Image (cartoon, rainbow, N blue to C red):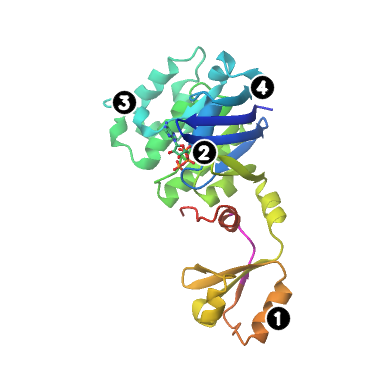
Amino acid sequence: MALSVRQLHKHFGDIHAVRGIDLDIAVGECLGLLGPNGAGKTTTVELLEGIQVPSRGSVVYRGEALGPRFRAEAGIQFQHTALQDFLTVREHLTLFARLYDAPLPVDEVLQRCALEALSDRDARKLSGGQRQRLLLGIALINDPAVLFLDEPTTGLDPQARRNFWSLVKSIKADGKTVVLTTHYMEEAYQLCDRIAIMDHGRIIAQGTPSELLAHHFGGAVLSLPQTALSAEQRAAGDWRAAGDRMESVVADVDAALTALHRSGTSLQQLLIREHTLEDLFIELTGEALRS
Ligand SMILES: Nc1ncnc2c1ncn2[C@@H]1O[C@H](COP(=O)(O)OP(=O)(O)OP(=O)(O)O)[C@@H](O)[C@H]1O
């Protein structure tokens, strides 16, 4: 295992932010931590990074407590406040490279993160996506074995987000272990081999995306325009609003369609789709992820 966590707890005064987490992250795996705001994702990642000290429990990296080996082999993508005014992209990478005994050549990291054309630009003049690529470059400067990305694409436009995903995929292909927190279901689906869903400081489900879906759902999701359902049906609680339509998670599609047909509901505009991770997230936490 790259990282093993046992019975991890973190208190901030009266707030019990992390409440007994057990987690194993295999070498070369990309693990995604998902959860609603305040679930404890950032605190958990900071405990894994050694930035926060657990109130109770242990974090072990390759069989050892977090120590010099972990610090040499971990890469952390910081928030943009870590960037210095007046320094260029290249100067940032050079500055952070000095912190390590055997950093990667700055030019290699520039190329890796598609920053070559921006190397002399003042970091304050970067777009959101370019800044995230610089922060990723800083995290990669020590050629880490394990990379931590905390909400790396929040606030990026869809194109910049996709570009960032391609970069992370190429880094994964090098065999690096990646720990990622995200609010974006598609990001988790695209990048993560395994997903842990957190709520109220606990992991409430974990597995590969397909395992999670297979374990929690049979059947499918039915979708009808709101106008196709009677007020009584809408109030019954089996249907939830999804834009101008209503959706219902059903275990037995045949039985559900027969019941709808018998009740006189028009099925002309019926859509049937597979379950997604978003459905699972809502089912488990009662909240929608930010899209
Ligand atoms: N340094 C701190 N001092 C006091 N409380 C804290 C501190 N850091 C986090 N918390 C609290 O711990 C809980 C978990 O916060 P955390 O930031 O880990 O959640 P999160 O899942 O990352 O949320 P978000 O998605 O909003 O970033 C919250 O109630 C938060 O207010």
**Mark 2 residue CB less than 8 A from any atom of ligand 1:** yes
Q: Residue 201 carries which label?
A: none
Q: Where is residue 168 in the image (x, y as percent from the top left)?
A: 54, 38
Q: Residue 47 at x, y = what percent?
A: 53, 28
Q: How far apart are marks 3 and 1 (CA)?
A: 64 Å
**Looking at this rendering, what residue extends furthest in the front direction?**
14
Left/right of residue 28 with respect to residue 143 in the rendered view: right
Q: Name the residue under label 1.
A: 258
Q: In this view, does 31 lie above or below 277?
A: above
Q: Is residue 244 left or right of residue 127?
A: right
- Report helix, strand or loop for mark 3: loop
Query: Where does label 4 land, which residue?
Result: 62
Location of mark 3 (residue): 84
**Residue 10 appears in the picture as rendered:** yes
For image coordinates 72% across by 53% down, the residue present is 215
- Closer to the chain start, of discs 1 and 2, is 2
Q: Give x and y (percent) for residue 84.
A: 31, 25
Give the spatial CA distance, label 2 vs label 4: 22 Å
Question: Where is residue 176 shown, x and y percent of the image?
Answer: 61, 30
- Real-space Cα distance between discs 1 and 2? 43 Å
Question: What is the span of residues highlighted in magenta in the rendered image?
Answer: 272-277
Q: Quadrant of ligand 1?
A: top left
* Residue tagged 2: 41
